[in-house]
Image (spheres, rainbow, N blue to C red):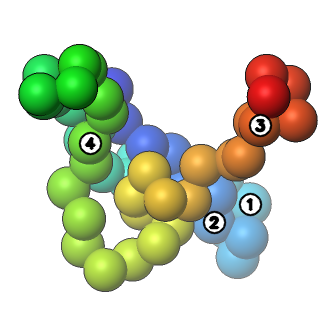
Amino acid sequence: MAVTWVWNYSSASWSIGETVTVVIGANGKYLRSNPDSRLTDNLAHLIDFDWIFP
């Protein structure tokens, strides 16, 4: 099992966010979290690594 981690600036600590699952779709495998309308708990909040691998 994999989960997202959320940094709490008030307490200066990490907390567990949402569960991440692998989904096999028509175009291959992809990651999906349980969207809850909170950007910081979901995969949309991931760091953009395009500068490493264009």
- Identified by mark 3, the residue type is Asp
Q: Are marks 4 and 3 in contact (CB under 8 Å)?
A: no
Residue 20, picture quadrant: top left
CA distance separating discs 4 and 1: 27 Å
CA distance separating discs 4 and 2: 22 Å
In-front residue for pair 21/1: 21
**Residue identified by numbered label 3:** 50
Residue 34, picture quadrant: bottom left
- Identified by mark 1, the residue type is Ala
Looking at the rendered image, the disc whose residue lies closer to the viewer, 4 or 3, is 3
- Number of numbered discs present? 4
Image height check: is 9 above or below 26?
below
**Residue identified by numbered label 2:** 8
Residue 1 seen: no
In-front residue for pair 37/23: 23
What's the residue at 24%, 73% (across, down)?
36
What's the residue at 26%, 42% (across, down)?
32
- Name the side, left or right, on which 3 lies relative to 54: left
- Identified by mark 4, the residue type is Arg
Q: Which mark is residue 32?
A: 4
CA distance separating discs 4 and 3: 19 Å
Going from N to C along the chain, the mark reached first, 3 or 2, is 2
- Identified by mark 2, the residue type is Asn
Going from N to C along the chain, the mark reached first, 4 or 1, is 1
CA distance separating discs 1 and 3: 28 Å
Looking at the rendered image, the disc whose residue lies closer to the viewer, 3 or 2, is 3
Q: Are marks 2 and 1 in contact (CB under 8 Å)?
A: yes
What's the residue at 88%, 35% (across, down)?
51
Q: Secondary structure at mark 4?
A: strand
Q: Which mark is residue 12?
A: 1
